[in-house]
Image: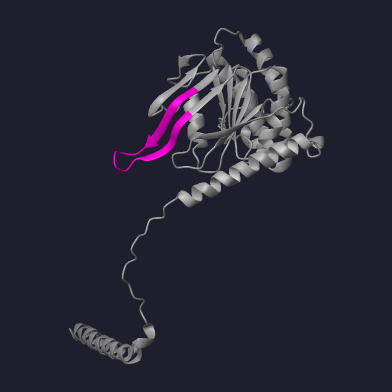
Amino acid sequence: MTTPAMEIDAVDVGFGPPGQRTEVLSNINLSVNKNEFVAIIGFSGSGKSTLMNLLAGIQPPSTGAVRMNGEPVLRPGPERGILFQNYSLLPWLSVYGNIDLAVKQVFPAKSTSERKEYIQRYIDMVSLSGSEWKKPAELSGGMRQRLSLARTLAMQPEVLLLDEPLSALDALTRANLQDEIIRIWEEDRRTVIMITNDVDEAVLMADRIVALTPGPEATLGKSFPVTLDRPRDRTTLNFNPEFIKLRNEVTKYMVGINHEAKKLRVSADLPLPDLMPIDFNSYDRKPRLAEDLSVTTSESTSVAKTENHELVGAADE
């Protein structure tokens, strides 16, 4: 029996002290084969990023185990490269410098000339040639995410973890980067686990789609194999009956489990405070204002007379 590249075994994750604990993930089981591209699709707030942090070794499970090649995942490591939603770039370093920093950590034995040639290969791979010495502030959002991808790939991870890396991009840039990731994956096959909330993106890119149920206590639901031939051409997919059928199946399933989750949610019946609004029309404010004004005027006159008397007395002296 082949050992899975990544495996999650009966994992629960919760936060908070006993009695006030919130269970985010419940009984998560997932097995990903070597070189397989798996997309996990779920709604916002269902614990997708928590699941990704489990795989990366950033978040320990409350119960259960996470394993890579049969070995427990206890901490982050370069064998698992993660691409976050934000760019996570160092703003004071150039394109070359951001990649170089990662390469030095993972491959300290490389000489300066070897490192230069190696880094340039990844810059060219993500189509950033000519921008080697630009800082992140000089790059567009799509270019920054391509730089982040190049830095992650340059560490040569066995497993590539994609935590909704394209969610903040406009539609055209997102489509271009989807094609870039697919092209790179097909050239240099690695195990990829991608988190997304986009059904079309999952069907276009993945070998298998796994649904994550709405939280709290989210768990993995139905799995959908994607048998579309590769390479996949996005311009013709919308006319492919198999693509249309699978997209509709996944969408219908996700809408269904979300509807069920809403019915099961119990809203807290909180008592409202017994408060009455102030009715300013019920107050006769004019006499009070006039009375206050007369008192203020009287006091001001008295003070003025006293001060004037003191000044006159001082002048006579």
Q: How is the image coloured?
A: one colour
Tally of marks: 0
Examine the rendered structure and indicate whether residue 158 appears above or below residue 243.
above
The spot of residue 203 in percent (x, y) is: 69, 34
The spot of residue 273 in percent (x, y) is: 32, 67
Left or right: residue 219 versus residue 113 is: left
Quadrant where the image shows the N terminus: top right
Q: Quadrant of residue 158?
A: top right
Q: Is there any visible trace of residue 112 in the rendered image?
A: yes
Q: Quadrant of residue 72?
A: top left
**Is 18 covered by the magenta stretch?**
yes
Work out whether residue 259 or residue 65 is closer to the camera in this orientation and state it.
259
The spot of residue 190 in percent (x, y) is: 63, 18
Left or right: residue 254 versus residue 265 is: right
Q: Is there any visible trace of residue 169 in the rendered image?
A: no
Examine the rendered structure and indicate whether residue 265 appears above or below residue 121.
below
Quadrant where the image shows the C terminus: bottom left
The spot of residue 117 in percent (x, y) is: 69, 13
**Is 9 covered by the magenta stretch?**
yes
Left or right: residue 56 versus residue 172 is: left
Label the magenta part by its dominant secondary structure. strand
Picture residue at 30% right of the left edge, 39% below the top: 17
Work out whether residue 247 or residue 198 is closer to the camera in this orientation and state it.
247
Q: Which residues are magenta?
A: 8-28
Picture residue at 62% right of the left edge, 33% below the top: 136
